[in-house]
Amino acid sequence: MQENSQPWNAYTAPLSGELVSTNAGVIKAVGCYGEKYSVGKIEYQLFSEAGYQYVISPYWDVVDGLGEEVFQGIPGIAMELRRKHYYRANRQPVFLSMRSPSEKREDLEELLEDAGMDSYDRLEWLIRTPRQSGCDNLILEPYREEVREFDYDGLDTLLCQLQYGDQVLISSHSAVSNNPSVYTEHLLRMVAAGAVIKFQKEKIVIDKKIRSAILSILQRQYYAGKNLQILKHRQGVEGAKGRGAYRGRRPMQIEPGRLQKVSDLFHAKKISEAEAMQRLGIVSRSTFYRKLKDLRE
């Protein structure tokens, strides 16, 4: 992608020089049902003499496949310019400042202690606390430099590790699932992560050339299926009420071992709140934290 011809200024022009250190995170949009879409990367670069800069790089092949109900842009970034990289030289990006605590916050030391940090770094704090801001549906997760190749062995294990640019080898379509709704969800989550997917038997490859088109189709299929499921549930409840057979919602039963596994991952900050809820099939945050409380007790 070519850089837009709009002029740079002192804060948006890229710095250059000897790099001293870097850190980076992946920006993800959390969908209505807990699915996560990799929409960009944010990187901090410290130079020996020029100061520091943040570089935000949208993953356009994912972004272009998303509807407005999932992604409305990265705050502080003029995405209409369609740049490959957006620079903020010696200045905190809006994306960081709007979702991280102020340096003057009274309980900042407690927040740093909870995150296992000795000194305050907004980017690192957000990476270690991958929770949604009240401003939008974006979160930040860790980024690794190396690209990896995975053999598909189930979605739960894979999604803990999968990152933009990774490759997933799948023996055939049937190895994902023979259930259409499950197949759609699993494929959606892998494509949404920005992975290159290779079906070996069918010799089909989903890469960045077609990712946005495939993602757009999968997302709409997935949401249509979920909305239909909710509608049928409501109709069933109304029908039961009409027959006088409705006794209210039963307490959600979750197998203790499964709950413990998800709880451990969540408290170790290996998965986000939304991902933990999705794995347990929980929609309500209050229900999620009540289950964790019951587990502790």
Image (spheres, rainbow, N blue to C red):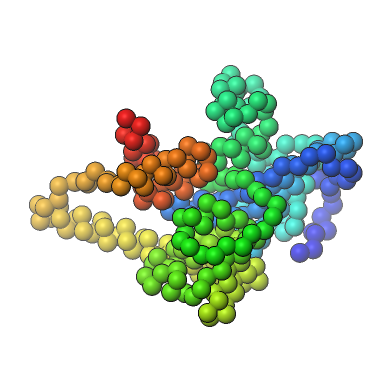
Name which residue lies at 32% across and 61% down: 229
Q: Is residue 42 visible?
A: yes
Q: Is residue 205 above or below residue 222?
A: below
Q: Position of residue 220 (x, y in %)?
A: 46, 66
Q: Is residue 73 above or below residue 266?
A: below
Q: Is residue 250 above or below residue 71?
A: above
Q: Is residue 139 above or below residue 80?
A: above
Q: Position of residue 249 (x, y in %)?
A: 22, 46
Where's the C terminus, which quadrant?
top left
Most extreme residue toward the left is: 244
Q: Nearer the viewer, residue 179 or 40?
A: 179
Name which residue lies at 65% across and 48% down: 143
Q: Nearer the viewer, residue 3 or 139?
A: 139
Where's the N terminus, which quadrant?
bottom right
Q: Position of residue 70 (x, y in %)?
A: 52, 55
Q: How many marks?
A: 0
> On the rendered structure, is 50 left or right of 62?
right
> On the rendered structure, is 234 left or right of 90?
left
Q: Nearer the viewer, residue 156 or 111?
A: 156
Q: Position of residue 32 (x, y in %)?
A: 45, 53
Name which residue lies at 23% across and 59% down: 235
